[in-house]
Image: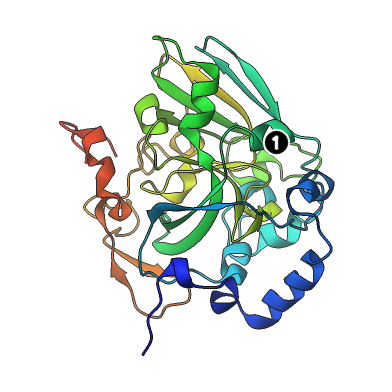
Amino acid sequence: MLIRKPADLRYSDVTPQPLYVNRRSFLAGSVALGAFGALAGTARSAKLEDVKKSPYNVGDEKVTPLEAITHYNNYYEFGTDKEDPAKNAQNFRTSPWTLKVEGEVAKPMTFDHDALFKIAPLEERIYRHRCVEAWSIVVPWIGFPLSALLKQVEPTSKAKYVAFESYYDSKQMLSERAAGIQLPYVEGLRLDEAMHPLALMAVGLYDETLPNQDGAPIRLVVPWKYGFKSAKSLVKIRLVAKQPPTTWNISGPNEYGFYSNVNPQVDHPRWSQAKERRLGELFKRNTLMFNGYSEVASLYTGMDLRKNF
């Protein structure tokens, strides 16, 4: 049997063929990055080109099919069932869009679509992800390092944490009562976590801009933490001196900690985290510490990761 690494795979190898052909038929008439602004307000995606391959990938692991990545989502603003976001986010308006970065910085800035794409060259990173519900996926994200964005605004010595805020519009999204969480969605990282080279600002997946249900037009990706830490559809980033509140920690502090590192030794109060099931696979596999990204372990030297879960 011939085994090919992800860098050698064509996307048609891992995507159901009818879906791949239909999407390519549509994209044949799109103009690379120039189509981004025109299409951002719809459920369609535009092709991204001039994307370099990154050394940050998962090696020989099979990439999760696009159909699963775009139709099995946690995005409570558009529904609490996994299939809801793909249906309910179709008309989500993501253009015009701005991302404000402020707080303990020397140069607060507001980035529009074009400015976001000029922060750093786009690269593809194939990351594994582990969700708190014990399922996992492997995604070919396209984006740029979060550190490149933060360096633009020059954090001051007072900046210790980075707070993220997602877009919320009650006219397009569920109410807090229907979603079951406080909105807008907020998340946070320590500054050193945010500056780690693995932390990514994603603007696409596979070779296209982000679908609405996956966090268009720009989202956070933190692969060594449980999926809910990777906030979607970001509109504000604030550098702060104290640990910021986070949505799921507010909703269930005994279940969802601030750090939320993938840790098979710390169970969720209602289920074990020792095993996970990759979407599309029958059998479970062992959960890896830090989701297999051992290079982040030095960030937590001396910390009790059972207490700081």
Reply above or below: 37 against 11: above
Give percent across and percent down for residue 33: 73, 48
From this viewpoint, which residue is outermost toward the left?
302
Task: Using the image, determine if residue 101 lies above or below residue 2.
Answer: above
Name the element at disc 1: loop
Q: Is residue 303 visible?
A: yes
Residue closest to the eye, 280 or 248: 280
Q: In the image, is 104 to the left or to the right of 95?
A: left
Q: How many marks?
A: 1
Q: Pick whichever, 271 or 115, lies toward us.
A: 115
User: Observer-nearest residue: 91 or 24?
Assistant: 24
Question: Residue at the location (46% across, 31% down)?
Answer: 147
| Percent position of residue 15, x then y | 59, 75
Q: Position of residue 270 (x, y in %)?
A: 35, 56
Residue 14, quarter of picture? bottom right
| Residue 246 visible in image | no
Q: Is residue 150 above or below residue 61?
A: above
Image quarter where the C terminus lies is top left
Identify the residue shown where x is 42% and y is 13%. Answer: 241
